[in-house]
Image (tube, grey):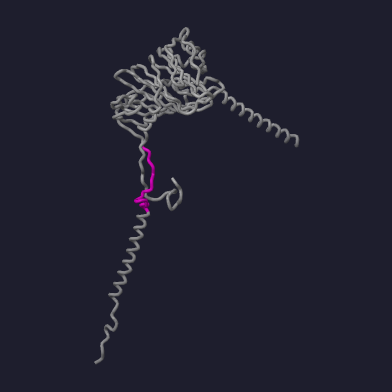
Amino acid sequence: MRGIRRTHRTRTTHRLLALVVALLALQLGSLVAPAYACGCGAMVTDRTARIGVDRETSVVRWDARTGTERIVMRFTVHGDAERAAWIMPVPHRADVTLGDPELFEELEELTAPEHRDRPYFWPRGRDWPFSAGDGDSAGALPGMDGGPGVGVVGRERLGPFDVARLTATDPTALSDWLRRNGFELSDRLAAELRPYIDRKWEYVAVRLAPEKAGAKLYGALDPLAITFRNDTPVYPMRLSRLAATPQSLGLFVLADHRMEPRGSIGGDRPEVLFAGTVDKPEGAVARVAGPGPVYLTAVDQSFPEPARIDGDHELVRAATDTPYREVIWKDRLWTVAGIPVWLLTVGGVLLLGTAGGFAAVRARHAAGNRRAPRAGAGVRSAA
């Protein structure tokens, strides 16, 4: 019997050890696996490094009169990579410049939710008397010769970015060129580029690194502005299929009218957070949209399963230009001059009740005095 128990304990121990080893192997594998987590196809330049995109925020300026589209992109990233790269397809020849970080701050201020108070009468858990005291530097892309199937339109150094503008007639040739020039790519990239190759789109390839040697790519990166001609506004998203983690997209659209994505393209339903006219744009917004009135639409969308993304966002005019602003309600205890109204009400009722009680007692006392006979009344003297 003791031998059977000893054998059982030995098997249990072996199973636990095997489980621990498997978990350690899984953890180590996640540390060295490449991460392709950017909505537009970001790629880590070193397979031993990790990077992820917490949020992709972009501004689309669509000028219907000139048929010009400008996309200003900013990524918020985390990880331990010193260098990273991404590629973005565009329908026509693009100009690339540095974007203005203040643009996003101004747009977030313009589209911020409206905060309203919602008063309530009776005290709640955190109100008195229930709760007292609670307070409220990267290497440049080598070579200008694209080789067979790839054309290098131009290359610029923009702050921490090395930008190559490319054309391609073969997705494999484009993938090979990028790999030869220092881009660590997903093995699936060539297949995902095929729809853009068939439509004769061009490409913006970017390598980026912190300006300080040895620093990690972390937080909000400098924005890039990509301008090109187009018949209809579009926001490229197909390469988001390569992302290994859920994605979040924030999109500001500046146009003549309220705009919206034509569909969800495999993500959650796009949610409009703001829609309205900016009568007099100022600052960075004016530098992108121009001085005249412009309609601003803010859209937010989540992609829990990036592999389900099946296309690019086509931006179309909404049925109406109905304005909208998100409202965030905050419940507040109803007060007057800092005193809770319920306390004033209850105190007033008690005061009135007490006063009424005193008045009733006095009235009964006065009535009793009137009914009581005077001393000696009704007694007649004998003759």
* Outermost residue, left side: 383
Indicate yes or no whether the magenta region holds residue 317.
no
Q: Is residue 195 visible?
A: no
Asked whether 76 or 233 is in front, the reply is 76
The image shows residue 125, relative to residue 79, as above or below, that is: below
Drawn side of residue 77 relative to residue 373, left or right: right
The magenta-colored residue range is 327-342
* Residue 214 screen position, x and y as percent: 54, 24
Q: Is residue 337 magenta?
A: yes
Name the quadrant containing residue 260. Answer: top left
In the figure, is residue 193 to the left or right of 61? right
Query: From what the image shows, is residue 206 above or below residue 294?
Result: above
The majority secondary structure of the magenta stretch comes to: strand
Q: Which quarter of the picture shows residue 109? A: top left
Residue shown at 50%/12% (left/top)?
176
Task: Measuring from the top left, give residue 235's x and y in whole percent.
Answer: 39, 21
The location of residue 27, given as percent across then percent down, is 59, 28
Q: Quadrant of the N terminus?
A: top right
Residue projecting furthest to the front: 212
State the residue in front, 199 or 126.
Answer: 126
Q: Residue at x 33, y 68 (%)?
A: 361
Q: In this image, 257 relative to 143: left or right?
A: left
Visible residue check, residue 207 = yes
